[in-house]
Image (spheres, rainbow, N blue to C red):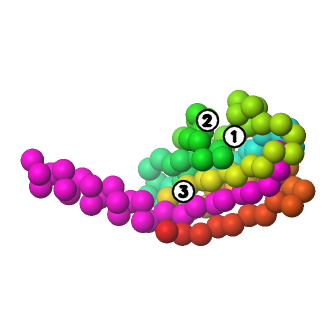
Amino acid sequence: MRVIITCALCVLSSLTMLAGTLVLEGKYQGKDLYVVNSVSSSGVGYCVFEVLVNGQISSDEWNSPAFEIDLDIYGLQLGDDLVITIKYKEGCLPKVVNPGDLWTSAYLRSYRY
């Protein structure tokens, strides 16, 4: 039983290492964000596997070809700092359709683990 658990943990940790992260930082402007979510490189499922809004896991449904990150539910006020973290699988890249809706001094970072 220990061997099975150890193997499962190794597989899960290796999946996390084969991933990338998009981080959008800016100010809340009263608008939601929209993401085009490609099919994963394996052909099974979609690219994005987790979305965080200011460190909180988003309840939005991201297992689809496109999705909305609903920011209204976080009780943000106009001008509040906002950090959106989109974690995605290796071999694909989600596209944020409207990153400019965080602009005032927003910028985008992309990195891999």
Total numbered labels placed on residues in the image: 3
Q: Quadrant of residue 78?
A: top right
- x and y percentages locating residue 98 in the rendered image: 81, 51
Q: Which amino acid type is shown beneath numbered disc 1? A: Ile
Q: Are marks 2 and 1 in contact (CB under 8 Å)?
A: yes
Mark 1 lies on a secondary structure that is: strand
Query: Residue 42 placed where, x, y %?
Result: 44, 58
| 20 magenta-colored | yes
**Residue type (three-letter) at the residue carrying disc 2:** Asp
Whichever of labels 3 and 1 marks the residue nearer the N terminus, that label is 1
Disc 2 + disc 3, Cβ < 8 Å: no
Q: Residues within 10 Å of mark 3 (few under 14, many from 20)?
A: many
Q: Is residue 75 left or right of residue 17?
A: right
Q: Is residue 55 left or right of residue 75?
A: left
Q: Which residues are magenta?
A: 1-28
Amino acid type, label 3 = Tyr
Taking 6 as reference, is 30 above or below it?
above
Q: Residue 31: x percent and y percent?
A: 83, 40
Query: Residue at horizontal 29%, vertical 58%?
Result: 11
Residue displayed at 68% across by 51% down: 84
Ranked by sequence position, the earlier of labels 2 and 3 is 2
The residue depicted at 54 percent of the width and 64 percent of the height is: 20
Q: Residues within 10 Å of mark 2 (few under 14, many from 20)?
A: some
Residue 70 included in the magenta stretch of the image: no
Which residue is nearer to you in this view: 113 or 54?
54
Which residue is disc 1 drawn over? 69
Residue 105 visible within the image:
yes
Q: Residue furthest right?
A: 104
Which residue occupies the foreground of this view, 41 or 13? 13
Give the spatial CA distance, label 2 vs label 1. 6 Å
Q: Residue 60 — which label?
A: 2
Q: As displayed, is residue 73 above or below residue 18?
A: above
